[in-house]
Image: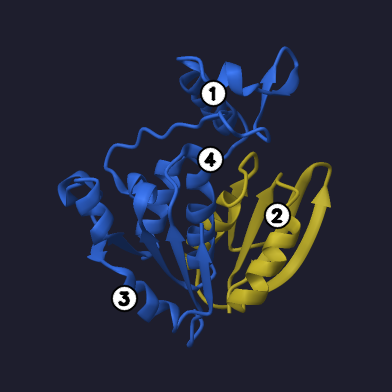
Chain colours: A blue, B yellow
Amino acid sequence: MADNPKSMSIIVTKGSLDWAYPPFILATTAAAMDVKVTMFFTFYGLELLKKKLDLQVSPLGNPAMKMPMAGMHMAMPNLVGMLPGVDAAATVMMKNMIKKKGVASIEDLRMAAVESDVKMIACQMTMDLFEYKMEDMIEGPVLGGAASWVDLATKSDINLFI
Amino acid sequence: MADKTLDAKGLNCPLPILRAKKAINEISPGQTLEVLATDPGAVADFAAFCRTTGNELVESGQTGNVYRFVIKKT
């Protein structure tokens, strides 16, 4: 263990299945590399702290999201993406790919983050705005606001906004 | 012969690194950890992991599609 560990903060703003990966991958990897990590969850990012995760991915408005169909990888036209059930189907498809390719689940990465002492801050204002309750969230996160993040950001070697 | 072996074959980023960190925590300084992986990104990642953590990458090689790393805990 390094005597003077580096530190990193990540602002987590998105709560879809695909966008849940970058912050948790970077946080767990940095922690494994003896970097002190703090994650600040705000707006839709707070969804990632819920005890029971039900993350979805949407091809709507995302032309870069290609899905394996009929032996090829195809982007979904927005007109099709709007149909009921498409998000659910895309989510099932992505979860199958995740399993097949040996990619960790968000639940596993989140548990790894908690176990490796990644500090988590839940944005008080968004909690209030969305009427979220701490008892719906996993154990570990503390409440905080913008000042908490600014304070730690001024002392962090790396600050990311995802 | 390494003191401990971690089979991370079939696992994708960042799992080989996370499992390796866990395994390193279970050995003593001076002991070695052997990691087997199939993720091609692991070659650059284990070098980076060792540079940052100060552990020593003693060996980095490939047999077929399996990458093998030996890390000495400092």
Distance from Cα at disc 2 to Cα at disc 4: 22 Å
The quarter of the image holding the N terminus of chain B is: bottom right
Distance from Cα at disc 3 to Cα at disc 2: 38 Å
- Check disc 3 and give the amino acid type: Ala
Q: Nearer the viewer, residue A95 or B68?
A: A95
- Check disc 1 and give the amino acid type: Ala
The relative height of residue B32 versus residue B29 in the rendered view (above or below) is above
**Horizontal and vertical percent for residue A62?**
61, 34
Q: How many C-alpha atoms fall within 10 Å of the one at disc 1: few (<14), some, or many (≥20)? A: many
Q: Which chain letter matches label 4?
A: A
Which residue carries the number 4 mark?
A18
Say if mark 1 contacts mark 4, CB within 8 Å.
Answer: no
Foreground tag (2 vs 1): 1
Q: Is residue B12 visible?
A: yes
Q: Give the side of residue B4 with respect to residue A118, left or right.
A: right
Q: Which chain letter matches label 3?
A: A
Q: How many C-alpha atoms fall within 10 Å of the one at disc 4: few (<14), some, or many (≥20)? A: some
